[in-house]
Image: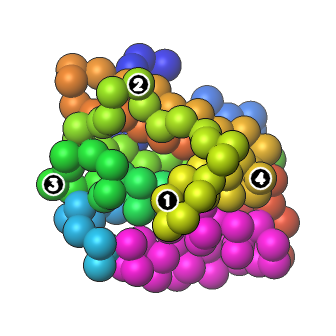
Amino acid sequence: MAPGSALIPRLLDLSPGTEALRHCFALPAHPESVAGARRVTRSRLAEWRLSGDAHDAAVLIVSELVTNAVVHTVSTRVVCELRCDEERLRISVQDQGHQPGGPRLSLTADGEHGRGLLLVDSMSTAWGSVDAGNSSGRIVWAELPYRTERSC
């Protein structure tokens, strides 16, 4: 995959009979947008019938990743993508101007800051970040398994 293409709609290479669900939305990089990202995520995951712990974890992960993009970058907007295939839910958040070196997991999270990525790390099966390319920011992603009332 080319750098920065994680948030660009494209055809997915899936086995016959397999369906992938995808939703992408953008919000201003303001603190109040974090609540908006949680609302959009809850709504979309309910439509996809993603329930239980995976639903709650996904909402929290979106909240933490959007918060990090708002607080720790010089972005004017953030873009969030939710993608559900037959095995996992992938959450991606792209900012417009990343901090040098990208997000770092701090094992000594004290005070008000530093716990977000610890939560993401503990709730996801994998997470990471990649430059979006063309100096357009950074994409931070997390994946988690899910359980739905119907197959995605």
SS type, badge 1 = loop
Mark 2 — residue? 101
Task: Please say if 128 is above or below 20.
Answer: above
SS type, badge 4 = helix
Callout 2–callout 3 Cβ contact below 8 Å: no
Q: Name the disc covering residue 152, or none.
A: none
Q: Amino acid at mark 1?
A: His
SS type, badge 3 = loop
Give how far apart the Cα atoms at labels 2 and 4 are: 21 Å
Mark 1 — residue? 113
Callout 4–callout 1 Cβ contact below 8 Å: no
Callout 2–callout 1 Cβ contact below 8 Å: no
Callout 4–callout 3 Cβ contact below 8 Å: no
Give how far apart the Cα atoms at labels 2 and 3 are: 20 Å
Q: Which residues are magenta?
A: 34-63
Dot 4: few (<14), some (14–19), or many (≥20) neighbours within 10 Å?
Answer: few
